[in-house]
Image (cartoon, rainbow, N blue to C red):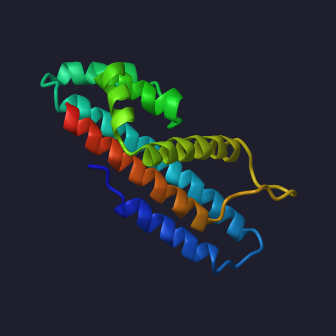
Amino acid sequence: MIVKSHIESNLKEIERRYNKPRTRKEPLYFSKLAILELCGWLEISIDELICRAVRSKVGDPRVMSVFESDVVDPIYGFHYKKHFRKMLCSAIGEITVQDIEKSMDQLKRQRLESELNTLYKNRNTLAHTYLKGITPNVDAPSRTIARFRLAYTGLKEFEREIFKRI
């Protein structure tokens, strides 16, 4: 099950601090932290969802270990096609993934794909820069929370569809 309580709590705390800054740069720091925190949660949640799907069908811990080391561990990201869908296809097969994508709520799937891709791009930009002189455009924590809710809804839809089929 995809758990949201900890990340939701973390994002709300970051937003609370963002709204009561002590210094001029604090809102920017908290904006950056919110995005990085959400992205870490996305990576972990996607990995856990895929591993749980495989574990539900594979009884041998050695096979599971090989799957994790060959498929999950080498992937560092959560972009829809490059990471999430690729791991999902390795876990349950291209045909099943296509069936899931066709049968699930298309708006939820499209929003998930859009949010994952946008957050992936934002995360890469923020993870490879630091805050200096010129202030970059960084989503406020409230926008990151909205992105989280859309991504969470899409992931839950995928989770439901995956476990209906396997």
Q: Is residue 59 left or right of residue 47?
A: left
Q: Is residue 53 visible?
A: yes
Q: Residue at x 52, y 63 (%)?
A: 145
Q: Is residue 80 above or below residue 67?
A: below
Q: Is residue 133 left or right of residue 91?
A: right
Q: Residue furthest right?
A: 133
Q: Residue furthest left?
A: 59
Quarter assignment of residue 63: top left
Q: Is residue 5 above or below residue 46?
A: below
Q: How many marks?
A: 0
Q: Is residue 76 visible?
A: no
Q: Residue at x 46, y 65 (%)?
A: 10
Position in image of residue 134 (x %, y %): 86, 56
Give whichever of 62, 54 is nearer the camera.
54
Quarter assignment of residue 143: bottom right
Position in image of residue 25 (x %, y %): 75, 68
Position in image of residue 151 (x %, y %): 46, 51
Position in image of residue 106 (x %, y %): 44, 43
